[in-house]
Image: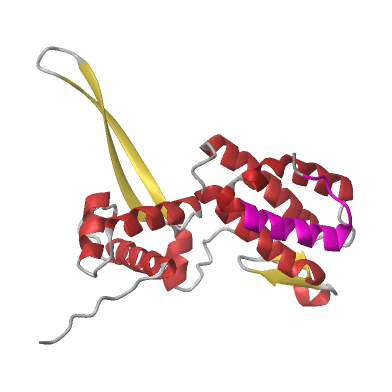
Amino acid sequence: MVKRTTTTFTEDDVREVILRFLYNKWKNPSGMSSAKPKINEIKKALKQKGIDHKQVIRNLQYLIDTGWVKEIVKTSTFRTPKGNLVNSESVSYMIGSQGIEHFDARSKFGKREAAAGIRIENVPGVVVIGNNNVVRQEFSNLFKSLDELNDKIKLTSELTDEQKVEYSYDVRTIQDQLAKPSPDKGILNKAWGALKFVGTIGSVANVWEKVRTGLEQAFGSIPPPT
C-alpha cells in the first residue's frame, strides 16, 4: 500500500497561495465581480491544495492588515414581505496594488515613496529598507524589529482596531526618527512611552522586548513599562 503524504504549509506559503489566487482572478476577469471573490470561494480553492480553512482565514486577515489584499464590504437594504427594512452586508476580497506588484514589475503609476527622487547613494550612512524606507545604517536592525512589532500589533486580538491604528502610528513615528542624522530623543521617548502597554500582551511581548533592547543600545534609557 502506498502511504499518502501530507504537505505542510508555512504561514508564508499560505499567504503566497492566497495572493496567487487573487492575482489570477484580477488578471483574468470575466466581469467586474469575478475579480472580487468571497471567502467561501477562496477557502474552496485552497482546500483543493490541502490548506485548512483556519489557515486561510488567519493569513487572509494578515494580508488585509498589511495592505496586500483589500476587503470590500457592500451594504444593501431591502424590505421584507412584512415591510421591515433590513440591512444586508456582503464581503469580498481583491488583491491590492502591493500584491499585484509582488508578481508584476513596479508600475510608474504606483504610489511614490518618501525616498523617490532622492539619490540615496549620495547620502553617507543612509540605506533603504523594504518599501523605500530610508533609515540610518546603524539603525537598520532596529527598524526591522519595529516592522516586526507593528505586524504583531496588527495581528493580536487583544487590541481594538482603533488601538492598533494608534500604536502603529507610534511605531512609525519612531521609525521616521531613525532616518535622521540626529534623532529627537524626546519624540522617541514619547512614542515609546505610548507603546508600553503592548509590552504586556503575550503575543507581542518578545518582539517588544527586542525593540526595547535595540532602543536602549542606540539611545540609552527609555521609559519602562508599567
In magenta segment, residue 222: yes
Q: Nearer the viewer, residue 2 or 19?
A: 2
Residue 38 visible in image: no
Provide residue 26's location: percent of width, then percent of height. Answer: 31, 61
Q: Nearer the viewer, residue 84 or 111?
A: 84
Q: Residue at the location (40% across, 64% down)?
A: 15
Provide residue 175's location: percent of width, then percent of height. Answer: 73, 56
| Quarter placement of the N terminus | bottom left
Provide residue 27's location: percent of width, then percent of height. Answer: 31, 66
| Quarter placement of the C terminus | top right
Region of the chain picked out in magenta, as a range: 205-224
Q: How is this picture coloured?
A: secondary structure
Residue 85 visible in image: yes
Q: From the viewer's perspective, is residue 174 above or below residue 124?
A: above
Position of 22 with respect to 180 (left or right) is left
Q: Residue at the location (60% across, 45% down)?
A: 201
Residue 44 sits in quarter? bottom left
Position of 28 with respect to 204 (left or right) is left
